[in-house]
Image (cartoon, rainbow, N blue to C red):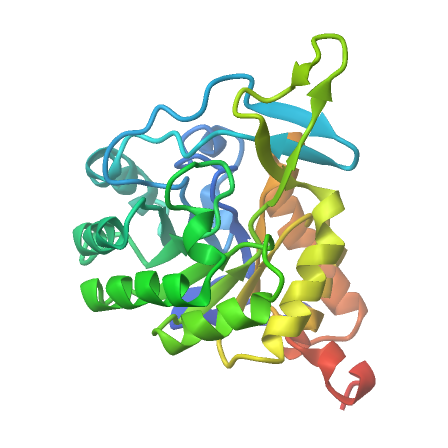
Amino acid sequence: MASEGRPDMRVNLAGIHLANPVLVASGTFGYGREMARWFDLRLVGGIVTKGTTLAPRAGNPPPRIAEAPAGLLNSIGLENPGVDAVIREEIPFLRQFGVPVIVNIAGETVEEYARLAAKLDGVEGVSALEVNVSCPTVHAGGMAFGTDPSATAAVVEAVRRATSLPVIVKLTPNVTDIVAIARAAEGAGADALTLINTLKGMAIDIRRRRPLLGAVTGGLSGPALKPVALRMVWEVAAAVDLPIVGCGGIMSGRDAVEFLLAGATAVAVGSATLVDPLAAPRIVREMEACLAEEGFGSASEAVGLARRSGGERA
């Protein structure tokens, strides 16, 4: 609740009650064990796990990380221990913090997505699924599903049938019309959308005359991504009736408030954590201070305000 001039930071994301709008983005927070040594995980609104597949994955060959101007290229390739190990070992650890846990799932076939959803359905401590149809660092599945509306719809429909959990679909920016993909996900039964995953890019080592990344290409994240992500949130918010998690280049509380004003209900902090392990709780504090400074009584009041009446307050 708001008190003594402090805004109410609580938001409702597709039925998931968040104490504040700041999630930690998939792939930048692992399964929370390492980060729990840095800060109390209860300080964030929710935790989105590392991308999880049916079987364990070793990921892409190194090098997997390369710096880019105003950003970072990564080519991890969904390295993870597999869903059974996550259910057995990681979810019980996260459950003790009492914050919503959203499991990011990725498959190579529609059937794999459905099997993942079925395995996670009813697992204590899992609040929702984030369906990753947008990863640019794997060669099968991943982004291939997220660049075609019918393929996106097929995955979402299969997941929707397999689970009673809220289904959040993470979309790729590597398309010509993200609105068409968003509408396909909505029509297939998505409860919310995450915008956006990384932009596909690469870097070359001049001295070695070869790509810097072992997999040649990777995903660009960080501050360079923010204008693209913000524009896509703006466009999609006008086209669908689903809540949106804004993601891409959020480094400060003011960045996060921009995403709310564009139409996002919540935000996900990703690469900022790799620069500053305390970024997520810092952004919660900065976001609260920014909202208070701008006269908002709650985070929810800011959602989509830049779209209405030229942004003027009522």
- Residue at position x 29%, y 36% in the image: 90
- Residue at position x 28%, y 42% in the image: 91
- Would residue 157 appear left or right of 217 to someone viewing this image? left
- Dividing the picture into quarters, in which one does residue 277 lie? top right
**Is residue 4 visible to us here?**
no
Q: Is residue 34 above or below residue 179?
A: above
Question: Residue 269, percent across and down?
Answer: 59, 48
Q: Is residue 81 above or below residue 149?
A: above
- Would residue 160 appear left or right of 272 to someone viewing this image? left
**Is residue 281 visible to us here?**
yes
Count the labels in the image. Answer: 0
Tell which of 275 and 65 is nearer to you: 65
- Would residue 272 appear left or right of 159 to someone viewing this image? right
- Would residue 100 appear left or right of 68 to someone viewing this image? left
Q: Is residue 35 above or below residue 232?
A: above
Question: Residue 246, percent across and down?
Answer: 60, 60
Quadrant of the frame with the N terminus? bottom right
Q: Is residue 146 above or below residue 12?
A: above
Tell which of 262 and 43 is nearer to you: 262
Tell which of 25 and 11 is nearer to you: 25
- Residue at position x 41%, y 54% in the image: 145
Report the residue that reaches farthest toward the top: 207
- Dividing the picture into quarters, in which one does residue 154 lie? bottom left
Question: Residue 147, percent across and down?
Answer: 50, 57
Tell which of 110 and 162 is nearer to you: 110
Question: Residue 216, percent across and down?
Answer: 58, 26
Quadrant of the frame with the C terminus? bottom right
